[in-house]
Amino acid sequence: MTEADLLLLRRGGGLWGVATAEVRRLVDHGDGVRVELGDGALLADEVLGVAPRLAVRPPGAVLRRFWPEPCDGIAVHRGSPVVVVDGRRPPNGLAAAEGEASHGKQHR
Amino acid sequence: MKPATPQEGGSLRCLLVRAGDYLCAVPVASVRRVVRALTVHALPGASPELSGLAEFSGEPLPVLDLARLVGAPPGATPSYPVTVVVWAGPPDSHEAVGLAADAALEIAEVSPSSVVGGGGGVVRGEAAVGGRPVRVLDLELLGAAR
């Protein structure tokens, strides 16, 4: 088990987390938010904020067997499960399309 | 087919659960808790057997659809669905997993010698319990690659 400071996102009804150290900026994108990272970007329906020192456990064999998407671990935040992703290799549905430009307002 | 671990009197004590149109026998030694159906959050791209992730005792818990896992035909809409939290995988590296089922029914003794068929996957085989066919599960195989 490790601890991590995570930016929490909601996408497709689920909660996702990415290390805050990977996040460069947040930009409005259509009805959601584009989370620009050091290497790549994610699309979120909503950004919920930062969860500091969240306890992250590695995905077990059962989860890997039935959900073989890339994943750094799983955690719980305020009673809800969180899937922790590597911004360089996000699962399908979370990654922003390559070459997709961000034109919206930047969050500060 | 791996022999069942005998309990007292050489029988395997199991929790009978209903999953779709099937009765399944879950070894009691593998059962951690039976709770009211947990709220599950689906994961995009997951296999149909994986309902998603839930929170259980402050920990994230993968929840499998037991009826899909054992290939059960759909049954009547359950009145009080449950999540059976079990230990899955080999004993030296087991993990907690939830099995979404329609109902937890009773404890029954299954004679290992009566288990036949080797249903494949997580189903060790089939046995008759109280005159009813029951799929006996082997949760040590749950984390194994398909």
Image (spheres, grey):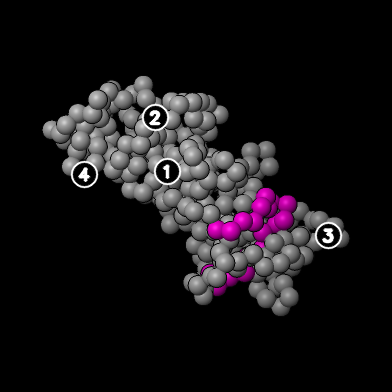
Q: Chain of mark 1?
A: A
Q: Say if residue A82 shows up in the picture.
A: yes
Q: Earlier in the sequence, mark 1 or mark 4?
A: 4
Residue A31, labelled with which disc?
4
Residue B146, labelled with which disc?
none
The three-letter code of the residue at mark 1 reads Pro
Q: Quadrant of the C terminus of chain A?
A: top left
Q: Is residue B98 above or below residue A80?
A: below
Label 1 crowd (10 A; few <14 / some 14-19 / many >=20):
some
Q: Is residue B74 above or below residue A103?
A: below
| Residue located at (55% from left, 29% from top) | A1
| Residue located at (47% from left, 34% from top) | A73
Q: Nearer the viewer, mark 1 or mark 2?
A: 2
Residue contact between numbered discs 1 and 3, judged by CB atoms under 8 Å: no
Q: Say yes or no: labels 1 and 2 on the same chain.
A: yes
Q: Chain of mark 3?
A: B
Residue contact between numbered discs 3 and 2, judged by CB atoms under 8 Å: no
Residue contact between numbered discs 2 and 4, judged by CB atoms under 8 Å: no
Is B25 inside the magenta-drawn segment?
Answer: yes
Q: Chain of mark 4?
A: A
Q: Earlier in the sequence, mark 1 or mark 2?
A: 2
Q: Which residue is mark 1?
A: A68
Q: Nearer the viewer, mark 3 or mark 2?
A: 2
